[in-house]
Amino acid sequence: MNTGFDVERIRKDFPVLSRELPGGRPLVYLDSGNSAQKPTQVIDVMREHLAMHYSNVGRAMHALGAESTEAYENARDKVAAFIGAPSRDEVVFTKNASEALNLVAYGFGNPTNDDPRFRLGPGDEIVISEMEHHSNIVPWQLLAQRTGATLKWFSVTDEGRLDLSNLEELVTERTKIVSIVHQSNVLGTVNPVAEVLARVRQVGALMMLDASQSVPHQQVDVAALGVDFLAFTGHKVVGPSGIGVLWGRGELLEAMPPFMGGGEMIEAVWMDHSTYAPAPHKFEAGTPPIVEAIGLGAAVDYLSAIGMDAIVQHERELTGYALGALGEVPGLRVIGPESLDRRGGTVSFTLEGIHPHDVGQILDDNFGVAVRVGHHCARPLHLRFGIPATTRASFYLYNTPAEIDALVRGLHHVQKVFA
Amino acid sequence: MIAESMYQELILEHYKHPQGRGLRDPYDAEVHHVNPTCGDEITLRVKLGDGGKVEDVSYDGQGCSISQAAASVLHELTAGSTVDETLAVVEEFTRLMQSRGQVEADEDVLGDAVAFAGVAKFPARVKCALLAWMAYKDAVVRSST
Ligand SMILES: Cc1ncc(COP(=O)(O)O)c(C=O)c1O
């Protein structure tokens, strides 16, 4: 590789990658799609803040309060820059991507919100897809149940692509919101946002992207994408768990009702009513995950310093290598695109006659290879493919071809056990 | 290589050649149990005869080797026994599975089911081993009421 990207140097940033598992097994971590490991740069920033600067934010009139508030709000600036947000006030800190998705769903069909764009009731429609994570399904099901609106679904093709052949019948004048995943956490598929968005704009609906699996792996620019809302989660971008992000267009956030009430989200409180702080604080009730937000700021700094382009290139090479190597394992079926075209470094597969739980158990226990097995919180997608579960290997900036070799060796061994 | 010890030859043999698989008529009760964390599922039927004899346990389902082999072993153990005898085995099997590997398996009671002793060390897999056995217990209760 001649991009200046040195995976061995990067691996040294992640302390866990050099630990041994019980029994002297090396760790082969191929589960970053589930949650990414953390570099020293993030751990140190969080430790330093906890040790030397910690205090509550936004309300403490002393030196530590000022330092903590500044660090917390700085993290917002960093995240805003990282995703190309036109304004820092459009970046809302949440607990995770799930909360960000629920927050937006809560804004629709809500009696306290009379903005016509958010009005939702019987006859109105919400559109999602069969490849969604449960986090981008259940909030919309709940919304449909609350309001009597109808939930509709994009299908997925056999190749694992969003089926846009009925785009015009699916997204219509009745549609109020379309919410789809940017990059699938199972298939690896990267969805054609522009094509869907063009139709969404034609019918005057809003569009949300679940970018939980794209923000960690490619340069995501919300302004260039042109959607209305975008959610992602800190723990998958080498940041800590407990912090997520909702980005929303300023005028929409302004029109939306608060999701939770509490301290810091208000302007003034009387006994009979309250007025609210402007976004983003309107959506950040109570003491936020302070150190987690600061850790997320350090995480996006870390990724930016390496360069998202270099990360994309590295993962592309790994994915190409993995698709080739896995393709030679007899009885292995990849669920998702088998070419590098519009796909990321997540490869899910089945092994004929062997249940994924058995695959995962033997890979872990004999080879220290950590993969995810099951339905990966995307049960409708697995039903679509007529399978109960898959084994998923997901790659990140710190993975190497040798780790993919270890996976393949492990799979051959699994097949021997079950032969 | 602890997992190797979980995948006992006997378990693999039952997984590859399940005994008594397939749903059969007649039956007194049918139950459907799922393991929501991993999606394993089983449909199980029980037919009881005179004198508390178990005439047939038939089942169908999908899941990992542990859950499927456990159903097959259960089928073999119940054939020709009385309900009371089988429930004693279910009890001992449950105790073994919930022991986190800390108790000795009683082979006299368990028979072939003793092969699952290694599973008890993997808390995530205990539910797989118990799926069919819990379904059986449920079906027996339902067929005698
Ligand atoms: C595509 C996708 N959406 C949403 C989520 C939910 O993220 P979180 O659990 O952090 O809210 C995940 C990760 O689990 C994901 O992969």
Image: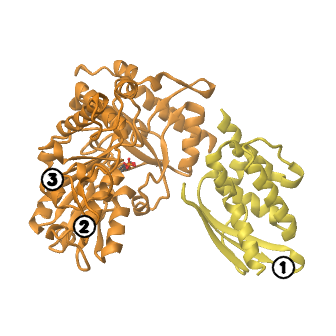
Chain colours: A orange, B yellow
Work out which quarter of the rendered image holds the C terminus of chain B and state it. Answer: bottom right
Instruction: Look at mark 3 in the image and give the residue it sits on.
Output: A249
Residue located at (56% from left, 52% from top): A353
Work out which quarter of the rendered image holds the N terminus of chain B and state it. Answer: top right
Q: Which chain is indicated by disc 2?
A: A
Q: Which chain is indicated by disc 1?
A: B
Instruction: Look at mark 2 in the image and give the residue it sits on.
Output: A108
Residue located at (21% from left, 31% from top): A309
The vertical placement of B12 against A410, above or below, is below
Residue A330 visible in the shown view: no
Spatial CA span between label 3 and label 2: 15 Å
Q: What element carries label 3?
A: loop
Q: Which of marks 2 and 1 is in front?
A: 2
Crowd band around label 2 with a 10 angstrom C-alpha radius: few (<14), some (14–19), many (20+): many
Three-letter amino acid code at disc 3?
Arg
Instruction: Look at mark 1 in the image and give the residue it sits on.
Output: B49
Image check: B136 left or right of A261?
A: right
Q: Which of A269 and A241 is in front in this view?
A: A269
Q: Is mark 1 on a helix, strand or loop?
A: loop
Q: Residue furthest left?
A: A202
Three-letter amino acid code at disc 1?
Gly
Crowd band around label 1 with a 10 angstrom C-alpha radius: few (<14), some (14–19), many (20+): few
Cβ at disc 2 under 8 Å from ligand 1? no
Image check: A113 left or right of B109?
A: left
Q: What element carries label 2?
A: loop
